Image (cartoon, grey):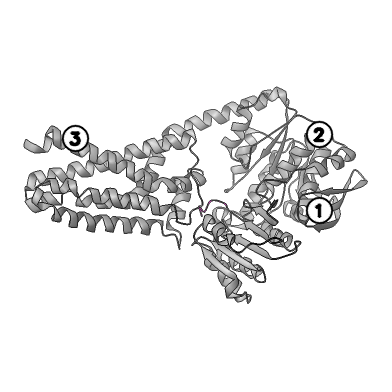
Amino acid sequence: MGIFISVPKTIECVLTALILAALSCGVIYRQVGVLQSSGYGSKKYFRWLKKKGNLAYLRHTFLSALCLLSYAMCALAFSFTGEWSAVIALSAYLLFFALYIYADKKVALRSSVTLTPRCKRLFAVTFLVYALSAYILVTALNFVDYLWGYAFFSYLRYCPLCILPLLLSPLLMLSNGIAKIYEVPHNKKFIRLAKEKLEKSDIKVIAITGSYGKTSTKNILYSVLSKKYRVLTTPRSHNTPVGIALAVNNANLEDYDIFIAEMGARHVGDIAELCEICPPDISLITGICGQHLETFLSFQNIVKAKGEILDATGGEAIIADDAYDLFAEYKCVKSRCDCVKDIVCTSDGTEFTLTLGGDSRTVKTRLLGEHSAYNIALAAQAAFSAGMTLDEIASAVPEIEQIEHRLQLIENGGVNILDDGYNSNVKGARAALKVLNYFKGRKIVVTPGLVELGVLEEEENCEFGKNLAGFDLVVLVGDTLVKFVEKGYKQAGGAAEKIRTVPTLASAQEELKGYLKQGDTVLFLNDLPDIY
């Protein structure tokens, strides 16, 4: 059939497809971080993609338009080379794809890619899908050129490849779906193994859930229990079935007495699924607020989901004082956590009275804020139920280390840095601002706003902005939620010269370099991935 199926033409098509696939993976790279932060949920990624104020797809459209115009101009400019002009003009794609990859680093996305084995497998599938899509387009265009045989069309035969940027996000979701053909059964097998290990073990399980404070309470409880027991815990903020299974399968359970499992949820049924893997002997509910309302859809669903842990608890369930009444209808053995009083907070730490078993002790922790006392109280009551005495618990409290990224105080060159990067809920934000006021000197807040609030997102971020009025400097990071924060700030009479908006956290840090001086305190509030 002539030139259409010639070896040179085939090589040209394959090389073009492979190069464009590699460049496309570079263009979509940071969005893979968003998908990863979404728990590889394509629906959640798609909600982020179409979210009002998200310019990701518009940027792809702009890239497509640039490729179209530049390719056409280049192809026509080199038309004197004959059909080679179509190949030469492909340099326009190379140029603008490369420029996009470089410029994309400066866009206000905080979702970084973690190259886990699963992520690498996803990239491999995505590359193949992009390469196949590009090859089909290239081959189809060459076939049309072969059929028509017009010189003008021959020059521009790769011009329609400009639509590829518009397909990158949909094809990423397709690749994710294909990858799950392997990932889903692989994960189920991994989770089943963890469940079987726990069933055969005598280890005591303490499970923690709630809208906020889960990881902080888990780390505090681990610190306290470790003074007497051998304790295994889920790492960092891992609170999904795979996260729990990872902790169990990587450990010899015979080496531990207690397993602390953090349990997260975004839908009704999530906690019940986690409890099937590791039914708790003791459970904790840290508190309830509108966090994750975007996926729960109602406050009642949040309460229902968190209450699933009570149905599965074999022993005592300990519930935060301000959340206890929400679970009054549950018939399990439950206790209200009201064992703390006389809280005194300073910039050096928190002192309070802890009462357990009818006895009281005054304790002091280096952790900052009133909320830290309540988190310690939950952990203390759980440790008491697990067999520790009040004296053992009280002696452990002063040794609790600051928790990374959760109002962690760092001193640097005379400047106090409050790293609250993993705080994204409404109550936690209020607590962080309260702690900031304990410090002397100028006070600065760096934040992108609050996420996962669904229909309350605008209202709560506006209210949050009102609470920022009065600080010496407010640096807003990003381009999605900050307009609501700024709106509230201005409504509260915040000074326009004291608020600034920057695209990235790195830009915020650069902004502060020439501003900060000894004695200042900077609060970095919420640096969670911007996947909502």
Instruction: Tell me the SS state at disc 3.
Output: helix
Q: Nearer the viewer, residue 214 or 400?
A: 400
Magenta residue check for 151:
no
Q: Earlier in the sequence, mark 3 or mark 2?
A: 3
Helix, strand, or loop for circle 1? strand
Task: List the residue tagged with mark 3.
Answer: 11
Q: According to the image, label 2 marks what residue?
A: 227
Q: Is residue 478 left or right of residue 278?
A: left
Q: Residues within 10 Å of mark 1 (few under 14, many from 20)?
A: many
Residue 290 shows in this picture: no
- Residue at 56% in and 56% down: 452
- Residue type at mark 1: give it: Thr
- The image quadrant of residue 279 is top right
- Badge 3: how crowded within 10 Å, few (<14), some, or many (20+)? few
Front in this rendered view, residue 67 or 359 = 67
Residue 350, numbered circle: 1
Residue 445 x %, y %: 63, 62
> What kind of residue is marked 2?
Lys
What x and y, as percent, mark residue 282? 75, 38
Of 450 and 286, which appears nearest the observer? 450
Q: CA distance from mark 3 to mark 2?
A: 67 Å
